[in-house]
């Protein structure tokens, strides 16, 4: 006699439970696979290794470091063996050793920790080659992209990129012209790198003994020109950290309430086109 297949009766609730278990298993397996794939890729690997400040031993960089440390950020500072660390005495920072012009150094620095944000406040002295900005940015942006840095804040100069029209570069010193040319290239490298960027351009950084008026601001109007202090810039840099309004934006930084020394006004008269001359008081 031919055996007959007798269907087993399962109550609807039991069937639903089995179905839910199977669906749950499938979802967990898929989620696991997705996390493995993402963990292997750059951007998702970026843990919060804090903020790396390039040029953090310098005048602007040290103000940025102080401001970030006061805000409770975990701050690492790139220093060369020859760097003086005096400006950072007593601050809770970690020093990492390296030269921004060395690809091997930057590879090591970026592979050792997954930084969330990088602030580039570096500067080439007047007697050093002024192509420093493009050379260093080519290396820094590449390793920042590879390690999944979520924001690179670059301090640049008014006169670079689309702000060239504000300045009569022919009247600037040769060294300034070369620096501006290189900063233009550096901006382009950063923008093309794919790393979310914030570029903060400034024209005149007053000496460190000048303190901000409290009105220092970042403008997206890139015809705005003026002076700014390093502590003002440090505050504005800190406010831009992880801030969606600062992502992939180029700003001009100014503090219009500052009273600037006569020598600064004389310099502006020489290099800033008359229609863009800042309306700042004089000292
Ligand atoms: N001065 C102005 O009026 C003015 C105007 C417009 C824009 N800016 C811009 O503002 C920013 C800051 O200027 P600043 O005068 O405050 O800077 P700064 O005091 O001259 O400090 C420069 C920093 O860059 C570091 N650095 C230079 N070359 C390096 C390299 N190869 N590898 C690693 N680190 C290196 C220095 O390290 P060490 O300590 O080892 O030397 C130092 O920490 C710069 O982008 C500058 O161009 C300045």
Image (cartoon, rainbow, N blue to C red):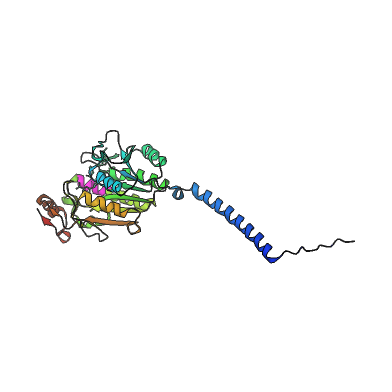
Tally the marks. 0
Q: Residue furthest bottom?
A: 12
**Is the N terminus in the top left, top right, bottom left or bottom right quadrant?**
bottom right
Q: Nearer the viewer, residue 13 or 151?
A: 13
The percent position of residue 246, horizontal first and vertical second, equals: 32, 57
Can the viewer see residue 32?
Answer: yes
Magenta part of the chain:
175-182
Residue drawn 42% across and 46% down?
146
Q: Nearer the viewer, residue 273 or 253?
A: 253
**Is 81 in the magenta?**
no
Q: Quadrant of ligand 1?
A: top left
Q: Is residue 50 above or below residue 164?
A: above
Q: Residue furthest top?
A: 81
The percent position of residue 250, horizontal first and vertical second, equals: 29, 56
Q: Is residue 37 left or right of residue 124?
A: right
Prevailing secondary structure class for the magenta stretch in the rendered image:
helix
Quadrant position of residue 244: bottom left
Q: Is residue 151 left or right of residue 210?
A: right
The percent position of residue 62, horizontal first and vertical second, equals: 25, 43
**Is 181 in the magenta?**
yes
Residue drawn 26% across and 39% down?
90
Residue drawn 30% across and 33% down?
81
């Amino acid at each position: 006699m031919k055996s007959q297949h007798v269907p087993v009766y399962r109550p609807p609730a039991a069937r639903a439970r089995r179905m839910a278990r199977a669906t749950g298993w499938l979802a967990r397996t898929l989620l696991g696979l997705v996390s493995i794939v993402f963990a292997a890729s750059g951007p998702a690997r970026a843990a919060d290794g804090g903020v790396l400040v390039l040029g953090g031993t310098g005048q602007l960089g040290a103000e940025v470091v102080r401001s970030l440390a006061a805000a409770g950020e975990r701050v690492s500072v790139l220093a060369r063996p020859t760097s003086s660390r005096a400006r950072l005495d007593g601050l809770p920072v970690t020093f990492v050793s390296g030269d921004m012009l060395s690809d091997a150094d930057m590879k090591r620095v970026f592979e050792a920790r997954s930084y969330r944000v990088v602030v580039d406040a570096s500067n080439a002295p007047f007697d050093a080659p002024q192509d420093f900005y493009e050379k260093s940015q080519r290396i820094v942006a590449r390793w920042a992209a590879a390690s999944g840095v979520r924001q690179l804040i670059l301090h640049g100069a008014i006169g670079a990129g689309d702000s060239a029209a504000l300045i009569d570069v022919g009247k600037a010193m040769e060294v300034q012209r070369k620096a501006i040319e290189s900063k233009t290239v550096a901006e382009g490298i950063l923008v093309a790198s794919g790393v979310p960027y914030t570029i903060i351009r400034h024209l005149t950084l007053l000496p460190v003994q000048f303190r901000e008026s409290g009105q220092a601001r970042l403008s997206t109007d890139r015809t705005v020109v003026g002076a700014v202090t390093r502590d003002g810039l440090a505050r504005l840099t800190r406010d831009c950290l992880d801030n969606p309004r600062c992502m992939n934006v180029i700003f001009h930084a100014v503090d219009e309430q500052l009273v600037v020394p006569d020598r600064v006004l004389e310099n502006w008269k020489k290099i800033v086109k008359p229609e863009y001359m800042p309306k700042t008081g004089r000292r």
